[in-house]
Amino acid sequence: MNLPAIVNGIARHRVAAVLLFLLVFPLVMPYEALAVNILIFGLFAVGFNLVFGYTGMLSFGHAAFLGVGGYLTGIAMVHFGIHWLPAIAVGVLASLLAGLIVGYLAIRTRGIYFSMVTLALGQVIYYIFYKAERWTGGENGLRGIRVEAIELFGFRLDFLNPITKYYIIWVFVALALWVVSRILASPFGAVIEAIRENEKRTVACGYDVARAKLLIFVISAGVCGLAGALRALHLSVVPVDSLHYLQSGQAVMMCLLGGMGSFFGPFVGAAVFLYLEDIVTTMTKHWMAVVGLLFMGLVLFFPRGIWGSFLHKLVQRGILHGERA
Amino acid sequence: MSAPPLIEVRNLSRHFGLFKALSNVSVSFAPNQLTAIIGPNGAGKSTFFNVLSGAMPPTNGQVLFEGQDITALQPHAYARRGIAKSFQITNVFKQLSVHENVRVAAQMRYSRYALFKPRSQIGEAIDEADALLERVGLTALRNKTVADLAHGQQRSLEIAMALAAKPKLLLMDEPTAGMSPEETASMMELITALAKERTVILVEHKMKLVMGICERLIVLHHGEFLAQGTADEIRNNDEVRRVYLGQG
Protein backbone atom coordinates (compact mmCIF):
# COMPACT_ATOMS: atom_id res chain seq x y z
CA MET A 1 0.00 0.00 0.00
CA ASN A 2 1.33 3.38 -0.98
CA LEU A 3 0.37 6.73 0.48
CA PRO A 4 -2.29 7.80 -2.07
CA ALA A 5 -4.05 4.44 -1.71
CA ILE A 6 -4.16 4.80 2.06
CA VAL A 7 -5.30 8.44 1.98
CA ASN A 8 -8.05 7.75 -0.56
CA GLY A 9 -9.12 4.70 1.39
CA ILE A 10 -9.54 6.87 4.48
CA ALA A 11 -11.43 9.48 2.47
CA ARG A 12 -13.81 6.82 1.16
CA HIS A 13 -14.65 5.75 4.68
CA ARG A 14 -14.69 9.20 6.19
CA VAL A 15 -17.27 8.48 8.87
CA ALA A 16 -15.44 5.40 10.11
CA ALA A 17 -12.16 7.35 10.09
CA VAL A 18 -13.64 10.23 12.06
CA LEU A 19 -15.25 7.92 14.58
CA LEU A 20 -12.07 5.92 15.11
CA PHE A 21 -10.22 9.14 15.69
CA LEU A 22 -12.86 10.29 18.17
CA LEU A 23 -12.59 6.97 20.01
CA VAL A 24 -8.99 7.66 20.98
CA PHE A 25 -9.44 11.43 21.13
CA PRO A 26 -9.90 11.71 24.94
CA LEU A 27 -6.44 10.20 25.40
CA VAL A 28 -4.75 13.21 23.81
CA MET A 29 -6.85 15.82 25.61
CA PRO A 30 -5.73 17.34 28.91
CA TYR A 31 -8.98 16.33 30.62
CA GLU A 32 -12.14 14.48 29.60
CA ALA A 33 -14.67 17.29 30.06
CA LEU A 34 -12.87 19.24 27.33
CA ALA A 35 -13.05 16.22 25.05
CA VAL A 36 -16.81 15.97 25.69
CA ASN A 37 -17.18 19.67 24.92
CA ILE A 38 -15.32 19.30 21.64
CA LEU A 39 -17.42 16.30 20.71
CA ILE A 40 -20.63 18.28 21.26
CA PHE A 41 -19.52 21.51 19.62
CA GLY A 42 -17.97 19.55 16.78
CA LEU A 43 -21.40 18.11 16.09
CA PHE A 44 -22.94 21.57 16.38
CA ALA A 45 -20.46 22.94 13.84
CA VAL A 46 -21.00 20.01 11.46
CA GLY A 47 -24.76 20.60 11.62
CA PHE A 48 -24.34 24.32 11.04
CA ASN A 49 -21.98 23.63 8.14
CA LEU A 50 -24.75 21.86 6.20
CA VAL A 51 -26.37 25.23 5.71
CA PHE A 52 -23.22 27.38 5.68
CA GLY A 53 -20.50 25.41 3.90
CA TYR A 54 -22.57 23.10 1.71
CA THR A 55 -25.57 25.22 0.75
CA GLY A 56 -23.83 28.60 1.00
CA MET A 57 -26.27 30.28 3.37
CA LEU A 58 -24.71 32.18 6.26
CA SER A 59 -27.09 31.76 9.19
CA PHE A 60 -26.51 33.83 12.30
CA GLY A 61 -29.29 32.16 14.23
CA HIS A 62 -28.14 28.60 14.72
CA ALA A 63 -27.65 29.04 18.46
CA ALA A 64 -31.46 28.97 18.57
CA PHE A 65 -31.44 25.30 17.59
CA LEU A 66 -28.65 24.39 20.00
CA GLY A 67 -30.61 26.15 22.73
CA VAL A 68 -34.05 24.81 21.85
CA GLY A 69 -32.65 21.26 21.70
CA GLY A 70 -31.05 21.71 25.12
CA TYR A 71 -33.96 23.47 26.79
CA LEU A 72 -36.66 21.12 25.57
CA THR A 73 -34.62 18.08 26.60
CA GLY A 74 -34.15 19.71 29.99
CA ILE A 75 -37.78 20.79 30.36
CA ALA A 76 -38.97 17.31 29.45
CA MET A 77 -36.75 15.82 32.19
CA VAL A 78 -37.09 18.44 34.93
CA HIS A 79 -40.73 19.45 34.60
CA PHE A 80 -42.24 16.26 33.25
CA GLY A 81 -39.92 13.65 34.67
CA ILE A 82 -39.38 12.05 31.30
CA HIS A 83 -36.54 9.54 30.92
CA TRP A 84 -33.39 11.05 29.36
CA LEU A 85 -33.55 9.04 26.14
CA PRO A 86 -37.04 10.12 25.00
CA ALA A 87 -36.18 13.58 26.37
CA ILE A 88 -33.41 13.81 23.76
CA ALA A 89 -36.00 12.96 21.13
CA VAL A 90 -38.23 15.76 22.48
CA GLY A 91 -35.32 18.20 22.20
CA VAL A 92 -34.46 17.15 18.66
CA LEU A 93 -38.09 17.30 17.53
CA ALA A 94 -38.46 20.77 19.03
CA SER A 95 -35.36 21.99 17.21
CA LEU A 96 -36.64 20.50 13.95
CA LEU A 97 -39.85 22.45 14.46
CA ALA A 98 -37.94 25.64 15.32
CA GLY A 99 -35.86 25.04 12.16
CA LEU A 100 -39.01 24.71 10.11
CA ILE A 101 -40.39 28.02 11.39
CA VAL A 102 -37.15 30.01 11.17
CA GLY A 103 -36.26 28.39 7.84
CA TYR A 104 -39.67 29.04 6.35
CA LEU A 105 -39.40 32.73 7.19
CA ALA A 106 -35.74 33.16 6.29
CA ILE A 107 -35.10 31.23 3.06
CA ARG A 108 -37.04 33.70 0.96
CA THR A 109 -34.21 36.15 1.52
CA ARG A 110 -30.63 35.91 0.26
CA GLY A 111 -27.15 36.93 1.26
CA ILE A 112 -26.89 39.53 3.99
CA TYR A 113 -30.69 39.66 4.41
CA PHE A 114 -30.80 35.96 5.15
CA SER A 115 -28.12 36.45 7.81
CA MET A 116 -30.05 39.34 9.36
CA VAL A 117 -33.39 37.52 9.39
CA THR A 118 -31.88 34.43 11.03
CA LEU A 119 -30.09 36.66 13.55
CA ALA A 120 -33.32 38.47 14.42
CA LEU A 121 -35.38 35.30 14.71
CA GLY A 122 -32.64 33.71 16.82
CA GLN A 123 -32.83 36.64 19.20
CA VAL A 124 -36.63 36.37 19.34
CA ILE A 125 -36.23 32.77 20.50
CA TYR A 126 -33.57 33.88 23.00
CA TYR A 127 -35.98 36.37 24.61
CA ILE A 128 -38.87 33.93 24.67
CA PHE A 129 -36.78 31.47 26.69
CA TYR A 130 -35.24 34.24 28.76
CA LYS A 131 -38.68 35.54 29.79
CA ALA A 132 -40.33 32.16 30.35
CA GLU A 133 -38.59 31.94 33.69
CA ARG A 134 -40.99 29.48 35.25
CA TRP A 135 -40.06 26.90 32.61
CA THR A 136 -36.51 27.83 31.75
CA GLY A 137 -35.05 29.37 34.89
CA GLY A 138 -34.54 32.63 32.99
CA GLU A 139 -31.19 34.25 33.58
CA ASN A 140 -29.93 31.40 35.74
CA GLY A 141 -30.50 28.81 33.10
CA LEU A 142 -32.38 25.57 33.49
CA ARG A 143 -30.96 23.56 36.37
CA GLY A 144 -31.47 20.12 37.75
CA ILE A 145 -31.03 17.93 34.69
CA ARG A 146 -29.71 14.84 36.40
CA VAL A 147 -28.57 11.68 34.75
CA GLU A 148 -26.54 9.60 37.13
CA ALA A 149 -26.45 6.24 35.52
CA ILE A 150 -27.56 4.56 32.37
CA GLU A 151 -28.96 1.04 32.46
CA LEU A 152 -28.23 -0.89 29.34
CA PHE A 153 -28.82 -4.61 28.79
CA GLY A 154 -28.35 -5.22 32.49
CA PHE A 155 -25.17 -3.15 32.66
CA ARG A 156 -25.03 -0.02 34.71
CA LEU A 157 -22.95 2.75 33.17
CA ASP A 158 -21.90 5.57 35.45
CA PHE A 159 -22.77 8.82 33.62
CA LEU A 160 -20.92 10.87 36.24
CA ASN A 161 -17.65 9.25 35.22
CA PRO A 162 -16.37 11.63 32.50
CA ILE A 163 -14.81 8.96 30.33
CA THR A 164 -17.94 6.82 30.37
CA LYS A 165 -19.95 9.94 29.59
CA TYR A 166 -17.69 10.68 26.64
CA TYR A 167 -18.31 7.29 25.06
CA ILE A 168 -22.05 7.41 25.65
CA ILE A 169 -22.24 10.79 23.92
CA TRP A 170 -19.90 9.43 21.26
CA VAL A 171 -22.59 6.90 20.27
CA PHE A 172 -25.07 9.70 19.54
CA VAL A 173 -22.51 11.79 17.69
CA ALA A 174 -21.53 8.73 15.65
CA LEU A 175 -25.12 8.17 14.63
CA ALA A 176 -25.60 11.82 13.65
CA LEU A 177 -22.35 11.96 11.66
CA TRP A 178 -23.34 8.83 9.79
CA VAL A 179 -26.69 10.38 8.88
CA VAL A 180 -25.06 13.65 7.79
CA SER A 181 -22.51 11.82 5.67
CA ARG A 182 -25.23 9.77 3.97
CA ILE A 183 -27.18 12.92 3.16
CA LEU A 184 -24.12 14.65 1.74
CA ALA A 185 -23.34 11.61 -0.41
CA SER A 186 -26.92 11.40 -1.72
CA PRO A 187 -28.25 12.97 -4.93
CA PHE A 188 -29.84 15.60 -2.71
CA GLY A 189 -26.38 16.42 -1.34
CA ALA A 190 -25.35 17.29 -4.89
CA VAL A 191 -28.39 19.53 -5.26
CA ILE A 192 -27.53 21.67 -2.22
CA GLU A 193 -23.96 22.07 -3.48
CA ALA A 194 -25.38 23.09 -6.84
CA ILE A 195 -27.46 25.74 -5.05
CA ARG A 196 -24.32 27.06 -3.40
CA GLU A 197 -22.51 27.21 -6.74
CA ASN A 198 -25.32 28.74 -8.80
CA GLU A 199 -28.85 29.11 -7.58
CA LYS A 200 -30.27 30.43 -10.84
CA ARG A 201 -28.96 27.48 -12.78
CA THR A 202 -30.27 25.02 -10.20
CA VAL A 203 -33.75 26.47 -10.72
CA ALA A 204 -33.27 26.26 -14.49
CA CYS A 205 -32.43 22.56 -14.06
CA GLY A 206 -35.88 22.07 -12.57
CA TYR A 207 -35.18 21.97 -8.84
CA ASP A 208 -37.47 23.67 -6.37
CA VAL A 209 -34.68 25.57 -4.66
CA ALA A 210 -36.86 27.02 -1.88
CA ARG A 211 -37.94 23.52 -0.88
CA ALA A 212 -34.41 22.09 -0.99
CA LYS A 213 -33.13 24.97 1.13
CA LEU A 214 -35.88 24.51 3.69
CA LEU A 215 -35.21 20.77 3.86
CA ILE A 216 -31.48 21.17 4.53
CA PHE A 217 -32.17 24.00 6.98
CA VAL A 218 -34.49 21.77 9.01
CA ILE A 219 -32.00 18.87 8.95
CA SER A 220 -29.26 21.23 10.06
CA ALA A 221 -31.44 22.51 12.91
CA GLY A 222 -32.08 18.93 14.01
CA VAL A 223 -28.36 18.09 14.15
CA CYS A 224 -27.67 21.27 16.14
CA GLY A 225 -30.61 20.42 18.39
CA LEU A 226 -29.09 17.01 19.12
CA ALA A 227 -25.84 18.74 20.04
CA GLY A 228 -27.84 20.96 22.41
CA ALA A 229 -29.62 18.00 23.97
CA LEU A 230 -26.33 16.19 24.58
CA ARG A 231 -24.87 19.34 26.07
CA ALA A 232 -27.77 19.59 28.51
CA LEU A 233 -27.02 16.07 29.72
CA HIS A 234 -23.31 16.79 29.88
CA LEU A 235 -23.57 20.03 31.88
CA SER A 236 -26.75 19.03 33.76
CA VAL A 237 -27.82 22.64 33.17
CA VAL A 238 -28.83 24.65 30.12
CA PRO A 239 -27.20 28.09 30.31
CA VAL A 240 -29.27 30.82 28.67
CA ASP A 241 -26.11 31.81 26.76
CA SER A 242 -26.52 28.76 24.56
CA LEU A 243 -29.29 30.67 22.74
CA HIS A 244 -27.30 33.86 22.39
CA TYR A 245 -26.16 35.12 19.01
CA LEU A 246 -22.54 34.98 20.19
CA GLN A 247 -23.00 31.22 20.20
CA SER A 248 -24.15 31.41 16.56
CA GLY A 249 -21.06 33.43 15.78
CA GLN A 250 -18.93 30.72 17.36
CA ALA A 251 -20.32 28.16 14.92
CA VAL A 252 -19.34 30.42 12.01
CA MET A 253 -15.88 30.82 13.48
CA MET A 254 -15.41 27.08 14.02
CA CYS A 255 -16.38 26.34 10.42
CA LEU A 256 -14.06 28.99 9.01
CA LEU A 257 -11.25 27.89 11.31
CA GLY A 258 -11.48 24.25 10.27
CA GLY A 259 -12.63 24.68 6.68
CA MET A 260 -16.24 25.09 5.67
CA GLY A 261 -16.11 23.12 2.46
CA SER A 262 -15.29 19.79 4.05
CA PHE A 263 -17.03 17.15 6.14
CA PHE A 264 -14.52 17.05 8.99
CA GLY A 265 -13.35 20.68 8.84
CA PRO A 266 -15.94 22.06 11.30
CA PHE A 267 -14.96 19.38 13.80
CA VAL A 268 -11.31 20.35 13.53
CA GLY A 269 -12.34 23.99 13.91
CA ALA A 270 -14.34 23.24 17.05
CA ALA A 271 -11.46 21.25 18.53
CA VAL A 272 -8.86 23.96 17.86
CA PHE A 273 -11.18 26.72 19.08
CA LEU A 274 -12.08 25.05 22.37
CA TYR A 275 -8.58 23.72 23.02
CA LEU A 276 -7.05 27.15 22.53
CA GLU A 277 -9.76 28.75 24.63
CA ASP A 278 -8.91 26.29 27.39
CA ILE A 279 -5.20 27.11 27.31
CA VAL A 280 -5.41 30.84 26.68
CA THR A 281 -8.00 31.60 29.35
CA THR A 282 -5.63 30.23 32.00
CA MET A 283 -3.05 32.80 30.91
CA THR A 284 -5.09 35.90 30.14
CA LYS A 285 -8.67 37.03 30.29
CA HIS A 286 -8.38 38.58 26.82
CA TRP A 287 -9.27 35.36 25.06
CA MET A 288 -11.47 37.10 22.52
CA ALA A 289 -8.54 39.27 21.40
CA VAL A 290 -6.55 36.13 20.64
CA VAL A 291 -9.51 34.70 18.74
CA GLY A 292 -9.76 37.91 16.73
CA LEU A 293 -6.11 37.79 15.71
CA LEU A 294 -6.26 34.11 14.87
CA PHE A 295 -9.39 34.67 12.86
CA MET A 296 -7.94 37.53 10.83
CA GLY A 297 -4.78 35.57 10.16
CA LEU A 298 -6.74 32.61 8.87
CA VAL A 299 -9.08 34.59 6.68
CA LEU A 300 -6.13 36.46 5.15
CA PHE A 301 -3.65 33.62 4.71
CA PHE A 302 -5.60 30.35 4.89
CA PRO A 303 -9.11 31.05 3.60
CA ARG A 304 -9.70 27.31 3.30
CA GLY A 305 -9.21 26.84 7.03
CA ILE A 306 -6.89 24.40 8.78
CA TRP A 307 -8.38 21.13 7.56
CA GLY A 308 -9.40 22.61 4.21
CA SER A 309 -5.82 23.76 3.52
CA PHE A 310 -4.48 20.36 4.51
CA LEU A 311 -6.86 18.58 2.11
CA HIS A 312 -6.05 21.07 -0.62
CA LYS A 313 -2.34 20.27 -0.27
CA LEU A 314 -3.08 16.57 -0.57
CA VAL A 315 -5.12 17.17 -3.72
CA GLN A 316 -2.43 19.41 -5.23
CA ARG A 317 0.22 16.77 -4.66
CA GLY A 318 -1.96 14.21 -6.34
CA ILE A 319 -2.30 12.12 -3.19
CA LEU A 320 -6.04 12.67 -2.78
CA HIS A 321 -8.67 12.65 -5.56
CA GLY A 322 -10.31 16.07 -5.79
CA GLU A 323 -13.85 14.77 -5.60
CA ARG A 324 -13.27 13.12 -2.25
CA ALA A 325 -11.91 16.19 -0.50
CA MET B 1 -48.51 22.78 -41.41
CA SER B 2 -51.46 22.37 -39.11
CA ALA B 3 -49.60 20.54 -36.35
CA PRO B 4 -50.55 22.14 -33.01
CA PRO B 5 -47.81 24.44 -31.74
CA LEU B 6 -45.50 23.21 -28.98
CA ILE B 7 -45.35 26.62 -27.41
CA GLU B 8 -47.39 29.70 -28.06
CA VAL B 9 -47.43 33.16 -26.54
CA ARG B 10 -50.43 35.45 -26.68
CA ASN B 11 -50.32 39.23 -26.24
CA LEU B 12 -47.16 38.98 -24.22
CA SER B 13 -45.94 42.17 -22.54
CA ARG B 14 -43.25 42.83 -20.01
CA HIS B 15 -42.72 46.28 -18.56
CA PHE B 16 -39.95 47.52 -16.30
CA GLY B 17 -41.51 50.58 -14.73
CA LEU B 18 -42.36 52.79 -17.68
CA PHE B 19 -40.02 50.95 -20.03
CA LYS B 20 -41.80 48.47 -22.25
CA ALA B 21 -39.27 45.73 -22.92
CA LEU B 22 -41.92 43.64 -24.68
CA SER B 23 -45.30 44.74 -25.87
CA ASN B 24 -48.11 42.65 -27.17
CA VAL B 25 -46.12 39.89 -28.85
CA SER B 26 -48.05 36.86 -30.14
CA VAL B 27 -46.20 34.03 -31.86
CA SER B 28 -46.26 30.26 -31.90
CA PHE B 29 -43.63 27.62 -32.50
CA ALA B 30 -44.31 24.31 -34.23
CA PRO B 31 -42.64 21.12 -32.92
CA ASN B 32 -39.19 20.19 -34.23
CA GLN B 33 -38.51 23.50 -35.84
CA LEU B 34 -35.40 25.62 -35.57
CA THR B 35 -36.26 29.27 -35.13
CA ALA B 36 -34.06 32.26 -34.47
CA ILE B 37 -35.13 35.44 -32.73
CA ILE B 38 -33.23 38.39 -34.11
CA GLY B 39 -33.33 42.11 -33.70
CA PRO B 40 -31.07 45.04 -32.86
CA ASN B 41 -29.79 45.61 -29.33
CA GLY B 42 -32.61 46.39 -26.95
CA ALA B 43 -35.19 44.73 -29.19
CA GLY B 44 -36.46 42.66 -26.27
CA LYS B 45 -34.91 39.33 -27.28
CA SER B 46 -33.51 38.50 -23.85
CA THR B 47 -36.70 39.53 -22.09
CA PHE B 48 -38.69 37.38 -24.49
CA PHE B 49 -36.42 34.45 -23.67
CA ASN B 50 -36.67 35.03 -19.95
CA VAL B 51 -40.44 34.93 -20.14
CA LEU B 52 -40.43 31.82 -22.35
CA SER B 53 -38.16 29.97 -19.93
CA GLY B 54 -40.20 31.00 -16.89
CA ALA B 55 -37.39 33.00 -15.33
CA MET B 56 -39.47 36.17 -15.51
CA PRO B 57 -43.25 36.47 -15.24
CA PRO B 58 -44.86 38.60 -17.96
CA THR B 59 -46.72 41.79 -17.07
CA ASN B 60 -49.53 40.74 -19.40
CA GLY B 61 -50.34 37.88 -21.69
CA GLN B 62 -50.15 34.12 -21.66
CA VAL B 63 -47.63 31.37 -22.32
CA LEU B 64 -49.14 28.11 -23.57
CA PHE B 65 -47.05 24.94 -23.66
CA GLU B 66 -48.54 21.85 -25.30
CA GLY B 67 -51.89 23.62 -25.16
CA GLN B 68 -51.77 24.33 -21.42
CA ASP B 69 -51.50 27.73 -19.83
CA ILE B 70 -48.23 27.69 -17.86
CA THR B 71 -47.90 31.45 -17.35
CA ALA B 72 -48.36 31.31 -13.58
CA LEU B 73 -46.07 28.34 -12.89
CA GLN B 74 -42.88 28.69 -10.86
CA PRO B 75 -39.58 28.84 -12.78
CA HIS B 76 -38.52 25.31 -11.82
CA ALA B 77 -41.88 23.95 -13.01
CA TYR B 78 -41.14 25.22 -16.53
CA ALA B 79 -38.01 23.09 -16.52
CA ARG B 80 -39.94 20.02 -15.34
CA ARG B 81 -42.45 20.44 -18.17
CA GLY B 82 -39.59 20.18 -20.65
CA ILE B 83 -38.35 23.69 -21.29
CA ALA B 84 -34.59 24.06 -20.94
CA LYS B 85 -32.43 27.08 -21.45
CA SER B 86 -28.76 27.48 -22.12
CA PHE B 87 -27.53 30.79 -20.86
CA GLN B 88 -25.80 33.61 -22.68
CA ILE B 89 -23.34 34.17 -19.87
CA THR B 90 -21.99 30.78 -18.94
CA ASN B 91 -23.96 29.66 -15.95
CA VAL B 92 -22.54 26.45 -14.53
CA PHE B 93 -21.51 24.99 -11.17
CA LYS B 94 -17.90 26.15 -11.09
CA GLN B 95 -16.53 24.17 -8.14
CA LEU B 96 -18.11 20.86 -9.17
CA SER B 97 -16.61 18.47 -11.70
CA VAL B 98 -17.67 18.50 -15.35
CA HIS B 99 -19.49 15.21 -14.96
CA GLU B 100 -21.22 16.31 -11.77
CA ASN B 101 -22.56 19.41 -13.51
CA VAL B 102 -24.32 17.34 -16.14
CA ARG B 103 -25.34 14.64 -13.69
CA VAL B 104 -27.07 17.13 -11.39
CA ALA B 105 -28.99 18.39 -14.42
CA ALA B 106 -29.95 14.86 -15.50
CA GLN B 107 -30.70 13.67 -11.97
CA MET B 108 -33.69 16.03 -11.78
CA ARG B 109 -35.78 13.47 -13.63
CA TYR B 110 -34.88 10.63 -11.25
CA SER B 111 -34.12 11.81 -7.77
CA ARG B 112 -34.64 15.20 -6.24
CA TYR B 113 -35.02 14.67 -2.52
CA ALA B 114 -33.69 11.17 -1.88
CA LEU B 115 -31.65 11.71 1.25
CA PHE B 116 -30.25 8.27 1.89
CA LYS B 117 -29.55 6.85 -1.51
CA PRO B 118 -25.85 6.95 -2.46
CA ARG B 119 -25.13 8.96 -5.58
CA SER B 120 -23.62 5.91 -7.22
CA GLN B 121 -27.10 4.34 -7.34
CA ILE B 122 -28.59 6.82 -9.78
CA GLY B 123 -26.99 4.92 -12.65
CA GLU B 124 -29.30 6.28 -15.37
CA ALA B 125 -28.34 9.87 -14.62
CA ILE B 126 -24.64 8.94 -14.50
CA ASP B 127 -24.79 7.13 -17.86
CA GLU B 128 -26.81 9.89 -19.49
CA ALA B 129 -24.32 12.48 -18.29
CA ASP B 130 -21.48 10.46 -19.82
CA ALA B 131 -23.34 10.12 -23.13
CA LEU B 132 -23.96 13.87 -23.25
CA LEU B 133 -20.31 14.65 -22.50
CA GLU B 134 -19.40 12.39 -25.41
CA ARG B 135 -21.84 14.26 -27.63
CA VAL B 136 -20.44 17.72 -26.88
CA GLY B 137 -16.85 16.46 -26.86
CA LEU B 138 -15.96 16.83 -23.20
CA THR B 139 -15.36 13.20 -22.25
CA ALA B 140 -11.64 13.74 -21.73
CA LEU B 141 -12.35 16.48 -19.17
CA ARG B 142 -14.94 14.45 -17.24
CA ASN B 143 -13.33 14.74 -13.80
CA LYS B 144 -11.93 18.26 -14.10
CA THR B 145 -13.26 21.07 -11.96
CA VAL B 146 -15.30 23.34 -14.22
CA ALA B 147 -13.49 26.48 -13.09
CA ASP B 148 -10.38 25.09 -14.86
CA LEU B 149 -12.10 24.82 -18.26
CA ALA B 150 -11.60 27.18 -21.22
CA HIS B 151 -14.47 29.45 -22.21
CA GLY B 152 -15.51 27.45 -25.26
CA GLN B 153 -15.50 24.23 -23.23
CA GLN B 154 -17.74 25.84 -20.63
CA ARG B 155 -20.13 26.83 -23.42
CA SER B 156 -20.29 23.22 -24.55
CA LEU B 157 -20.91 22.12 -20.99
CA GLU B 158 -23.71 24.66 -20.81
CA ILE B 159 -25.41 22.95 -23.78
CA ALA B 160 -24.89 19.48 -22.29
CA MET B 161 -26.58 20.62 -19.08
CA ALA B 162 -29.56 22.03 -20.94
CA LEU B 163 -29.87 18.76 -22.90
CA ALA B 164 -29.65 16.67 -19.74
CA ALA B 165 -33.19 17.70 -18.87
CA LYS B 166 -34.34 15.91 -22.08
CA PRO B 167 -36.20 19.06 -23.09
CA LYS B 168 -38.98 19.22 -25.65
CA LEU B 169 -38.10 22.87 -26.11
CA LEU B 170 -34.52 24.07 -26.05
CA LEU B 171 -33.91 27.79 -25.71
CA MET B 172 -30.40 28.92 -26.55
CA ASP B 173 -29.31 32.41 -25.70
CA GLU B 174 -26.42 33.35 -28.01
CA PRO B 175 -24.86 29.90 -28.00
CA THR B 176 -21.75 31.05 -29.87
CA ALA B 177 -21.02 34.16 -27.82
CA GLY B 178 -17.27 34.57 -27.36
CA MET B 179 -16.39 31.47 -29.39
CA SER B 180 -13.61 31.14 -31.91
CA PRO B 181 -14.60 30.60 -35.60
CA GLU B 182 -13.78 26.88 -35.35
CA GLU B 183 -15.78 26.49 -32.16
CA THR B 184 -18.64 28.44 -33.72
CA ALA B 185 -18.71 26.14 -36.73
CA SER B 186 -18.90 22.98 -34.64
CA MET B 187 -21.52 24.57 -32.38
CA MET B 188 -23.67 25.35 -35.43
CA GLU B 189 -23.33 21.74 -36.55
CA LEU B 190 -24.44 20.59 -33.11
CA ILE B 191 -27.43 22.95 -33.08
CA THR B 192 -28.57 21.75 -36.49
CA ALA B 193 -28.35 18.16 -35.29
CA LEU B 194 -30.22 18.97 -32.07
CA ALA B 195 -33.02 20.69 -33.94
CA LYS B 196 -33.79 17.45 -35.78
CA GLU B 197 -34.96 15.87 -32.52
CA ARG B 198 -36.68 18.76 -30.75
CA THR B 199 -37.88 22.33 -30.99
CA VAL B 200 -35.03 24.81 -30.75
CA ILE B 201 -35.33 28.57 -30.45
CA LEU B 202 -32.20 30.64 -30.40
CA VAL B 203 -31.29 34.24 -29.93
CA GLU B 204 -28.27 35.18 -32.00
CA HIS B 205 -26.43 38.30 -32.96
CA LYS B 206 -24.48 36.87 -35.86
CA MET B 207 -27.00 37.22 -38.69
CA LYS B 208 -25.16 35.22 -41.30
CA LEU B 209 -24.98 32.29 -38.96
CA VAL B 210 -28.69 32.01 -38.31
CA MET B 211 -29.69 32.83 -41.89
CA GLY B 212 -27.79 29.72 -42.93
CA ILE B 213 -29.36 27.18 -40.61
CA CYS B 214 -32.75 28.38 -39.35
CA GLU B 215 -36.00 27.42 -40.99
CA ARG B 216 -37.71 30.48 -39.63
CA LEU B 217 -36.73 33.83 -38.23
CA ILE B 218 -38.63 36.20 -36.02
CA VAL B 219 -37.64 39.84 -35.87
CA LEU B 220 -38.30 41.94 -32.79
CA HIS B 221 -37.85 45.69 -32.68
CA HIS B 222 -38.31 47.95 -29.66
CA GLY B 223 -40.10 45.13 -27.88
CA GLU B 224 -42.60 44.66 -30.68
CA PHE B 225 -43.10 41.94 -33.22
CA LEU B 226 -41.85 43.18 -36.58
CA ALA B 227 -41.75 40.27 -39.01
CA GLN B 228 -41.34 36.55 -39.41
CA GLY B 229 -40.47 34.25 -42.25
CA THR B 230 -37.71 32.29 -43.95
CA ALA B 231 -34.24 33.73 -44.35
CA ASP B 232 -35.05 34.95 -47.84
CA GLU B 233 -38.31 36.54 -46.82
CA ILE B 234 -36.62 38.37 -43.98
CA ARG B 235 -33.77 39.49 -46.18
CA ASN B 236 -36.25 40.97 -48.65
CA ASN B 237 -38.55 42.52 -46.07
CA ASP B 238 -38.35 46.29 -46.47
CA GLU B 239 -39.18 47.10 -42.88
CA VAL B 240 -36.56 44.69 -41.57
CA ARG B 241 -33.97 46.13 -43.92
CA ARG B 242 -34.79 49.58 -42.66
CA VAL B 243 -34.48 48.89 -38.92
CA TYR B 244 -31.89 46.20 -38.88
CA LEU B 245 -30.05 45.06 -41.93
CA GLY B 246 -29.63 48.60 -43.18
CA GLN B 247 -27.57 49.44 -40.16
CA GLY B 248 -24.79 47.01 -40.99
Image (cartoon, rainbow, N blue to C red):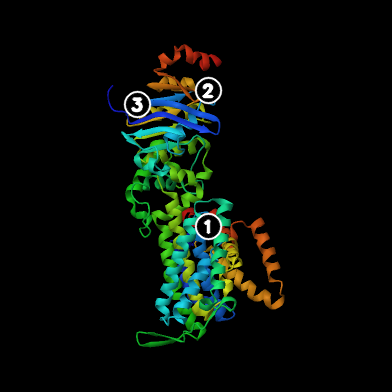
CA separation in Å, label 3 and label 2: 23 Å
Confirm or deny contact between disc 3 and disc 1 (CB under 8 A).
Answer: no
Q: Which mark is residue A122?
A: none
Circle 3 packing at 10 Å, graded few (<14), some (14-19), many (20+), is: some
User: Residue B20 at what x, y percent from top left?
Assistant: 52, 29
Tell which subunit mark 1 falls on: A
Answer yes or no: are tags 3 and 1 on the same subunit: no
Confirm or deny contact between disc 3 and disc 2 (CB under 8 A).
Answer: no
What type is the residue that disc 3 sits on?
Gln
What type is the residue that disc 1 sits on?
Gly
Q: Which residue does the image show at 56% across and 68% down from the upper left?
A: A126
CA separation in Å, label 3 and label 1: 44 Å
Q: Is residue A139 above or below residue B155?
A: below
Question: Residue B59 or A231: which is nearer the viewer?
Answer: B59
Return the residue at label 2: B40
Circle 2 packing at 10 Å, graded few (<14), some (14-19), many (20+), is: some
Answer yes or no: are tags 3 and 2 on the same subunit: yes
Return the residue at label 3: B33
Q: Secondary structure at mark 1?
A: helix
Position of B73 compared to A107: left or right? left
What type is the residue that disc 2 sits on?
Pro
Q: Which mark is residue A53?
A: 1
Q: Secondary structure at mark 2?
A: loop
Q: From the image, which quarter does the N terminus of chain A lie in?
A: bottom left
Confirm or deny contact between disc 2 and disc 1 (CB under 8 A).
Answer: no
Tell which subunit mark 3 falls on: B
**Tag in front: 3 or 2:** 2
Answer yes or no: are tags 2 and 1 on the same subunit: no
CA separation in Å, label 2 and label 1: 43 Å
**Tag in front: 2 or 1:** 2
